[in-house]
């Protein structure tokens, strides 16, 4: 009987610890970053695309930092779009580079 009670206590303790770590939101031993290509950054001028992309990504992983590509080959992201996207991701608590 004592062994069964000990197992129950360990199970409850494990569940509580898991909930605590899940509530923290960010990882403790490393930072997670991602990189967005210039063409995709430019597409984020569309609010619907920007929000749906964020919802998809943030439901899968907790990001700490995001790198925005400003140009690729002969293509450059408009300054207005870049400012808007930076502000959006900063408001979500991300470090933007």
Image: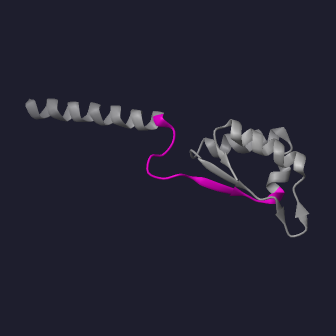
Residue 93 lies, in percent from the top left, at 63, 39
Q: Residue 26 vs residue 9: left or right?
A: right
Q: Nearer the viewer, residue 24 or 95?
A: 95
Boundaries of the magenta span: 24-39
Residue found at the very far bottom of the displayed protein: 73
**Residue at (59, 47) in percent of width and height:** 64
As drawn, 17 above or below 30: above
Visual colour scheme: one colour
Quadrant of the image containing the N terminus: top left
Q: Residue 43 vs residue 23: left or right?
A: right
Residue 65 lies, in percent from the top left, at 62, 50
**Residue at (61, 54) in percent of width and height:** 33
Using the rendered view, name the quadrant where residue 49 is placed: top right
Residue 24 lies, in percent from the top left, at 47, 36
As drawn, 77 above or below 87: below
Q: How many marks?
A: 0
Query: Is 6 in the magenta?
Result: no
Residue 18 lies, in percent from the top left, at 38, 37
As drawn, 9 above or below 87: above
Query: Is 33 in the magenta?
Result: yes
Residue found at the very far left of the displayed protein: 1
As drawn, 46 above or below 71: above
**Residue at (15, 29) in percent of width and height:** 5
Using the rendered view, name the quadrant where residue 90 is placed: top right
**Residue at (26, 35) in percent of width and height:** 11
């Amino acid at each position: 009987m004592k062994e069964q009670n000990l197992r129950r206590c360990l199970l409850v303790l494990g569940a509580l610890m898991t909930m605590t770590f899940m509530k923290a939101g960010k990882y403790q031993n490393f930072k997670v970053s991602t990189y967005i290509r210039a063409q995709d950054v430019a597409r984020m001028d569309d609010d619907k695309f920007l929000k749906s992309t964020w919802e998809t990504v943030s439901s899968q992983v907790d990001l700490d930092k995001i790198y925005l590509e400003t140009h690729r080959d002969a293509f450059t992201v408009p300054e207005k779009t870049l400012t808007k996207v930076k502000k959006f991701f900063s408001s979500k608590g991300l470090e933007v580079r």
